[in-house]
Amino acid sequence: MESNPFDQNPLLCKSTTIGVYGEKKMDALQFYPLSFLPSLLWWWEADMHIGVMVMMTQTLKTIMSSYHDFDKSSHLSPSLPPGRPGSRQWRQRRTGTLAIAIAALLMSTTAWLSLVFSDATACCFHRLKNWESSSPFFPWKKCIPHHLPKVTPPHSLKYGTGGDHLNNGSTIVDQEGLSLKHIVFGIAGSSQLWKQRKEYIKLWWRPNDMRGHVWLDEQVLQEHDDDLLPPIMVSEGISHFRYTNPTGHPSGLRISRIVTESFRLGLSDTRWFVLCDDDTIFNVDNLVDVLSKYNSSEMIYIGSPSESHSANSYFSHSMAYGGGGIAVSHPLAKALSEILDECIERYPKLYGSDDRLHACITELGIPLTWEHGFHQWDIRGDAHGLLSSHPIAPFVSIHHVEAVNPFYPSLNSLDSLKLFTKAMRADPRSFLQRSICYDHARHLSFSVSLGYAVQVLPNIVSPRDLERSERTYSAWNGISKRDEFDFDAREPSRSVCKKPIIFFLKDAGRESNASWGSYVRSRDKDDFKRRIFCFPHLPPLRNVQEIQVVVQPLSKNWHLVPRRLCCRQSNTGKEIFQISVGECGKGAFSPLY
């Protein structure tokens, strides 16, 4: 290939030259000493612009002179008919000349603007700026046009045979014995909210079994009980990165870099990096079960989109949201550590951290692996409809626990979360799993959400309807219409005679292999209305104040092929009702009729 003299000599700038004028300036550059080069480049650039303007003026002058000569000859030459000013012939000649003059002016202006705003001109100024601020012994940087960003993959990416992402023994057996010690957590926090948010982390963090850090924007004072929390790290500065989103906050840049900062700590025997927020609650036992399905030697990106259709439409339906948790395999974290800083500089207009991370992972060609147990929880208000209809998948996380009402009546938000996590620790695998059974003699339906509530409906309702989330909440943007949510939802029942009686969890524990939960009847404001408007039908189980639920342990591999649990109910007294829950036998089902 023929060499380019401008690539060989970085002190020369490519530029468009106009006629002999520009060529003389380029020739002159080659003979001036290097010390005069900045001034010469400025003089050359300015002279070129002046030259173009002179050419524009000369063009107009030539056209107008031609017109006057032509007009004079038309009056003096006997061979031409006289043209009086104001006559039709005179007006046609004058209009034609004016049109030619305007066209010439537009062409000259276009040429001048293309020169001023060309990449070559910008290149000259950038090289001049770099040359003035650097040592004379270092060459100028190569100029790359801003509107042509170069996407450079990391050097470690090579062609090779692809492995199986699922851990089926096809390539590597390192997933055997996966435990919490193989996972490094990167928790994004804020120094202003740390005193409040750290109470949420205490509910699920196990300091003796887990590794990770809380990444804050600045250092905070340590308190006496902070040894129960992950160590605190202060994130690196982000002032040198561009951020141009008008509605977001530059902290998204800092949070997006937590995965690379965690990787660069060089913690040994790390297979997964899990990213989350300081107001996220994790079921870490189920997290290990879920990650054990995948081969950590591959580049894998695990998480879940938002519940809000508007949020997914604005960001992406294939993006994992960090509030609900993002799991990144070690090879993917390594690849990100090589390209992330360069990559996020290409996306200054993005809103936050999740979309920047997603953009860079997309450049690597890695799709989202959707696990339904990760919950962003972009909702507000009463979370009952979601807690009582968890998908048939291991529960892994929830987010935005401050933005919703307390889970259990008569308890504040923090105490509700303490009871919530107590039930989660009692039986992590079956926590929030659904079970549906029927009492055909009394025409009742039972919908059990383990660790949260038992609903008793005064009629027979099909599982298809019960598995739809009752829309008791609104989206993060305040919209509560059904089409705002990217999952099956149903309207709350408007008839007090069809509304369920709800028994909320009061206590939970574990005895031997089985776990248990005590659920007490809630005081419903509609009880009095039921007695009047639903007469002669009495409220279901009107004398029962407590339902005891006993849960048989799930098999170790239930999470690989999950199925909704089965249940059966029995009376143990006038005020106590008992339900037994466990895995369904093969072919077993709960008949509706």
Image (spheres, rainbow, N blue to C red):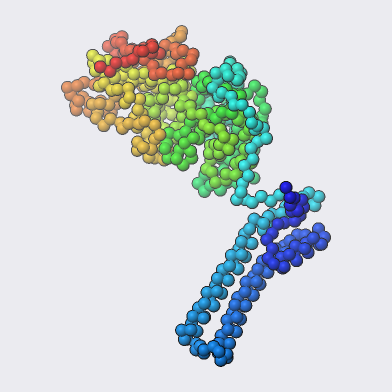
**Image quarter for residue 410?**
top left
Residue 284 appears in the figure: no
Give percent across and percent down for residue 5. Answer: 75, 53
Q: Which residue is outermost to the left?
A: 536
Give percent across and percent down for residue 488. Answer: 36, 30
Q: Nearer the viewer, residue 334 or 173?
A: 173
Q: Quadrant of the C terminus?
A: top left
Q: Residue at x 40, y 34 (%)?
A: 486
Give percent across and percent down for residue 347. Answer: 57, 44
Q: Which residue is outermost to the front?
A: 79
Q: Residue at x 59, y 77 (%)?
A: 63
Left or right: where does residue 172 sit relative to residue 477? Answer: right
Q: Residue at x 43, y 25 (%)?
A: 416
In the rendered image of this protein, does residue 462 appear above or below residue 57?
above
Give percent across and percent down for residue 294. Answer: 55, 22
Residue 201 appears in the figure: yes
**Image quarter for residue 551?**
top left
Q: Nearer the viewer, residue 428 or 364?
A: 364
Q: How many marks?
A: 0
Q: Residue at x 58, y 19 (%)?
A: 170
Left or right: where does residue 19 sit relative to residue 332? Answer: right
